[in-house]
Amino acid sequence: MKTMSGGKTLFEKVWNNHVVRQQADDLPAVLYIDLHLVHEVTSPQAFTELRQRGLKVRHPEQTLGTMDHSTPTTPRGLDGVIPVVDSQAAAQLDVMRKNCADFGIPLYDLGTRNQGIVHVIGPEQGLTQPGMTIVCGDSHTSTHGAFGALAFGIGTSEVAHVLASQTLLQYKPRTMAIRVDGHLRDGVTAKDIILAIIAKIGVGGGTGYVLEYMGEAIRSLSMEGRMTICNMSIEGGARAGMIAPDDTTFDYIAGRPSAPKGEAWDRAMAAWRQLPSDPDAGFDAEVTLTAEELAPMITYGTNPGMGMAITSPVPDPDHLKDVSQKLALDKALRYMDLQPGQPLLGKKIDVVFVGSCTNSRISDLREAARFIEGRKVADGVRMMVVPGSQQVKRQAEGEGLDRIFKDAGAEWREAGCSMCIAMNGDQLQPGQYAVSTSNRNFEGRQGKGGRTFLASPLTAVAAAVNGVVTDPRTMVNQRERA
Amino acid sequence: MEPIRQFAGRIVALPINDIDTDQIIPARYLKVTDKAGLGAALFSDWRYSADGSAKQDFVLNQPEHQGASVLIGGHNFGCGSSREHAPWALIGGGFKAVISTYFADIFRSNSLKNGLLPIIVDEQTHQQLISMAEEDAMTEVTIDLESQTVRLPDGRAVPFPIDGFSKHCLLNGVDQLGYLLSLEAETARYEASHAARVNTFA
Ligand code: SF4
């Protein structure tokens, strides 16, 4: 809890470093933004506003455009071109090209080497660095907090603010420490940690807070695992999620195209090492979990907070005291066509989606490939594997992961958001069930009438192979015995 | 933006918790490049059947609720995606305010920038408003931004919070970008003392 001591949290240090004008009674703080990521869906109206006012982009060299949301991920034609069949999406992509060209912003265009999901490309280019402020017109910008950056999603009006002024109006959020002690058991992953956290605090539990994840289980995670955790901070309603930078962070950044080099690297490291929260820093709220107690998680409802251990029965609305919560769960179970008390293990599924800014990085694909190697996607199940970026795709192909997926009967796609948001034609049919490694199970999120179970890549593969929801731990054991 | 001071409007209740922005406007309607015309997509998946016909049991389709301009949502209204298309669609659908017990951060911020008032009331008032809307579709409330109150039909004036800066901008039709641009000298001073931390061309 808050103490009167002088210690500062990671968040406070980054915030203080970026204040252009202090927050006053009736005025929000003006915060400087180091890096602004822009994609085709939430930016067109912001560029229109700049044009109407005759404004320029203040710092094109601190801005980067990519195309990911409405882009097709269907394999390239023989001519090497990715076909855009949806005329409205094609028009939106053209507008993005024109906006970036007119305002001088670098763009990772569809089909080019570096294109990918906005929250995958920032880190992989080394643009995402500790201590920075990063924004994007996208709520999962919280992903970049895994590096000890203050990163959060903004609306389109704010996209215009940052384009034109490189600053943003913000009231200082509160801080919440989320400590995960101990070590994860086999078959339990970063995705299960964050689903457990959201199940515990609820989809509104983090509203008004910046979360800092800490504890042994967080420290032991790879950068990819940390990104998976920070990515879903917004699903708990939080403004942002952060993890203190350490050697794992520095090793990940070193040598990437936009990482500091030579002396600049040494200076950056010296500054980055100052960022972790001071031992006597206080938080406005604290939550603690124990890693050993966590099981693979799965959602049963229509928001990411409706999650449980995969071995649990679907909860019963009648056991809830709060009337509005009871109604919400009842509505969710009707949409999902599930009965209270029913186990999800053994539930037949139609589609498995491995991808999205939550779980489409190289380590996610390696983990999924290792698990599916020598196994087959069950009859009647469609499995899609969608790498997060062109770079992840090339790397995976270099390691032969694409062959493993294809041999198992899965589809191997181009990079993009794909079925996470179902804007590009990759979507569920009404009534279908999917196990998905993405981050949202809202009604219709993966296609109108579609039903989503959110889970880890391991749980997704286990479902693909068996055609039913399966505890991946039972398969890990099988393989070990074999 | 037009200044907002006071308005009266009929209320309609959608008392569902955690209404996310994918429900307010599904992603397939986000392939547009302007703000206009999104009212037609408001709550599309709840409003229309697969064949495109309006679902008669959905409250916003009921004739007696046409013309309502104040939406009473469940707790944690507007969670999920940061899409500003959500307030644009609500405004396009004729709404000037949404009342709930609390809002998701980004939705609240987006709404305030577009003149859609996100009004937070206590749980008891919230319940009362839902009951009133369900009992009588003609129920009207008056929202007064200056005094930060919602006036109920029984005459009770319920206060609501709003940050001073947003209030000032809404009352005077001031846009926030103009304010940020007026601080150019301070931004330039910050930049002079802090080297740029990245270069996206590198
Ligand atoms: S993968 Fe999904 S959640 Fe991530 S940026 Fe794309 S649409 Fe948003």
Image (cartoon, helix red, strand yellow):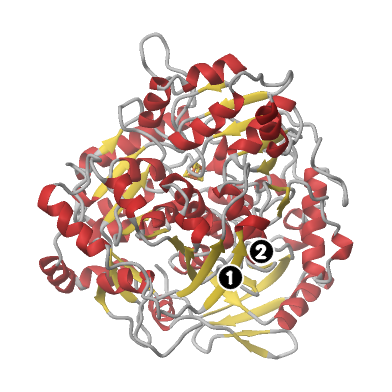
Quadrant (top left, top right, bottom left, bottom right) of the C terminus of chain A: top right
Q: Position of residue A416 (x, y in %)?
A: 45, 33
Which quadrant holds residue B187?
Answer: bottom left
Q: Is residue A306 left or right of residue B111?
A: right
- Label 1: state its secondary structure: strand
Q: Position of residue A259 (x, y in %)?
A: 22, 46
Badge 2 and badge 1 in a common chain? yes
Q: Chain of mark 1?
A: A
Q: Position of residue A476 (x, y in %)?
A: 66, 34
Whether residue A450 is visible, yes or no, is no
Q: Is residue B66 above or below residue A338?
A: below
Q: Position of residue B43 (x, y in %)?
A: 65, 51
Specify few, some or many for label 1: CA neighbours under 10 Å numbering under 14, 14-19, or 20 or more: some
Residue drawn at x 77%, y 52% as measured from the top left = A332
* Tag 2 near tag 1, CB within 8 Å: yes
Residue drawn at x 45%, y 19% as measured from the top left = A400
Q: Is residue B184 above or below residue A399?
A: below
Asked whether mark 2 lies closer than 8 Å to ligand 1, one says: no
Whether residue A376 is visible, yes or no, is yes
Q: Is residue A348 above or below residue B6?
A: above
Disc 1 designates what residue? A287
- Label 2: state its secondary structure: helix
Camera-side residue of A70 and A221: A221
Separation of residues labelled 2 and 1 (CA atoms)? 9 Å
Q: In the image, which is nearer the foreground, mark 2 or mark 1?
A: 1
Name the amino acid, label 2.
Answer: Lys
Q: Chain of mark 2?
A: A
Disc 2 designates what residue? A200
Among numbered discs 2 and 1, the one appearing first in the sequence: 2
Q: Is residue A351 above or below residue A48?
A: above
Camera-side residue of B50 and B202: B202
Count all numbered tags in the image, as a single digit.
2
